[in-house]
Image (spheres, rainbow, N blue to C red):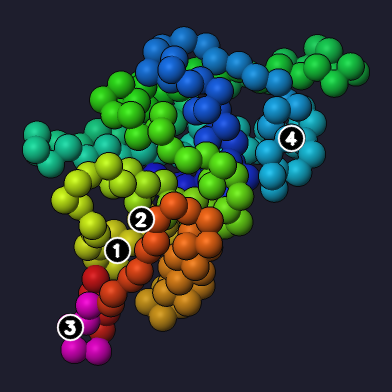
Amino acid sequence: YMHHAPSLRALKLMHLMIAKAGGRMAEPVQHEMRLSEINSIDGMGHHDQESIKPLFLELTTAAMVYDEPDKKRYSMGTLLDKAVVDYRHEATGDILVSWYFGRLFIEMAERSNHWAILDRQTVFHLQSKYSVLLFQYFASLQNLKHKTGEVFTVDQLRSMLGVEQGKLARFADLNARALQPAIAEINQLARFTLTATLRKTGRTVTS
């Protein structure tokens, strides 16, 4: 799960950075790309050296929790360790962006091929952060032969979708404004189909 989940544009930037790192994402090395590559992504808008700063700040404050139930432990860390925007040659449009991934992300990338095989073209076309977070979670289950679903408590669902504290407090609002629109958008674009079944205790949805 991601805590302090970034905005849609910051999530798309994150996935572009992972794609650019490619087979070296699990190495503690500096990665880099041009700002023009960021601006070419659908829905990113047109950024300069100043307007890209808030997106990187979102990514440096996004915390990740990596749970390992078989080992009865979980780890916490950040996606990025450091990012640099070099705008010495801004006049020619040649702005260089470089970064180091955080230690936890590097360990996650080393242990799993999930980030390497994720369908980023789907991510780049999604139009809400809820859709991106839901998609990247369920995409991780695609290669598990006997896994066809997942059960979330309502609190776990909020965490997975990156819903801010105090926002969409009623489950009816969470379902109508976050979960169902995300499922509908994913089902239009992804290679798999999602459905949600609500489980209740009395009249209250519990999972």
- 200 drawn magenta: yes
Q: Residue furthest bottom?
A: 203
Quadrant where the C terminus is found in the figure? bottom left
The amino acid beneath tag 2 is Ser
Residue 45 in which image quadrant: top right
Label 3 to label 1: alpha-carbon separation: 15 Å
For marks 1 and 4 on the same chain, the one whose residue lies earlier in the sequence:
4
For marks 3 and 2 on the same chain, the one whose residue lies earlier in the sequence:
2
In the depicted view, which residue is nearer to us: 143 or 168?
A: 143
Q: Which residues are magenta?
A: 199-203
- Residue plotted at (41% across, 29% down): 116
Nearer to us: label 2 or label 4: 4
For marks 3 and 1 on the same chain, the one whose residue lies earlier in the sequence:
1
Q: Which residue was labeled with disc 1?
A: 155
In the depicted view, which residue is nearer to us: 174 or 23?
A: 23
The amino acid beneath tag 3 is Thr
Looking at the rendered structure, the secondary structure element under dot 4 is helix
The amino acid beneath tag 4 is Asn
Q: Which residue was labeled with disc 4?
A: 39
Label 1 neighbour load within 10 Å: few <14, some 14-19, many 20+: few
Nearer to us: label 3 or label 4: 4
Instruction: Tell me where residue 69 appears, x and y as whole percent.
Output: 12, 41
Q: Using the image, tell me which numbered label, if any, was put on residue 201.
A: 3
Q: Which residue was labeled with disc 2?
A: 159
| Callout 2–callout 1 Cβ contact below 8 Å | yes
Label 2 to label 1: alpha-carbon separation: 6 Å
